[in-house]
Image (cartoon, rainbow, N blue to C red):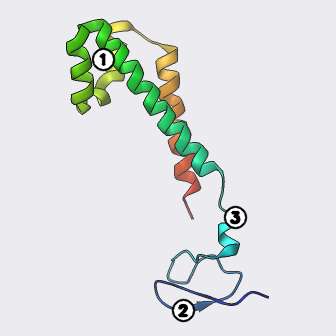
Amino acid sequence: MTAPKECSVCGTVNSPNATHCDCGALLTGEAVASRRPVSFPIGMALFFASGAAMLVFELIWFHRWWKGLGVVIALFAPPIAALFPFVYLFKEGVSLLYFGVWAAGLVGLFIAANTTRT
């Protein structure tokens, strides 16, 4: 039999099987840690991998369009990075590869965000 869990936020003693306190805080412990979903790290890895791929994609295309100045612009102008999908769409047309990577990043973010909900 496991011991009752004490909330680190409000100090209330809760039942051994409780995962959340009445105050809403997550109760840490062996039982909760063993049930941590594996989808959160998978979602975050997908999100960060697609972000890295999009950065490389942006650097390559800015170099093709504007040579060395394009690489400097891509590295030091973050608002351009946010607008790049639309710049690419206007300049080159629809690319299923680029927008597929973008969609994969959004899916990864959605998976990670839904995993953390209580």
The dot on residue 35 is 3
Q: Is residue 96 left or right of residue 38?
A: left
Dot 2 lies on which element? loop
Q: Position of residue 78 (x, y in %)?
A: 25, 32
Relative vertical location of residue 26 with respect to residue 37 in this rendering, above or below = below
Front residue (pair 24, 47): 47
Q: Position of residue 112 (x, y in %)?
A: 54, 49
Dot 1 lies on which element? helix
> Which residue is situated farthest in the right direction here?
1
Residue under the point 32% across and 7% down: 64
Q: Which residue is mark 1?
A: 87
Q: Which residue is mark 2?
A: 12
Mark 2 or mark 1, which is nearer the start of the sequence? 2
Q: Quadrant of the C terminus?
A: bottom right
Q: CA distance from mark 3 to mark 1?
A: 43 Å
Q: Position of residue 105 (x, y in %)?
A: 50, 34
Q: CA distance from mark 2 to mark 3?
A: 23 Å
Mark 1 or mark 3, which is nearer the start of the sequence? 3
Residue under the point 57% across and 46% down: 111
Quadrant of res 20: bottom right
Relative vertical location of residue 96 with respect to residue 22 in this rendering, above or below = above
Mark 3 or mark 2, which is nearer the start of the sequence? 2
Residue under the point 60% across and 44% down: 42
Amino acid type shown at disc 1: Val
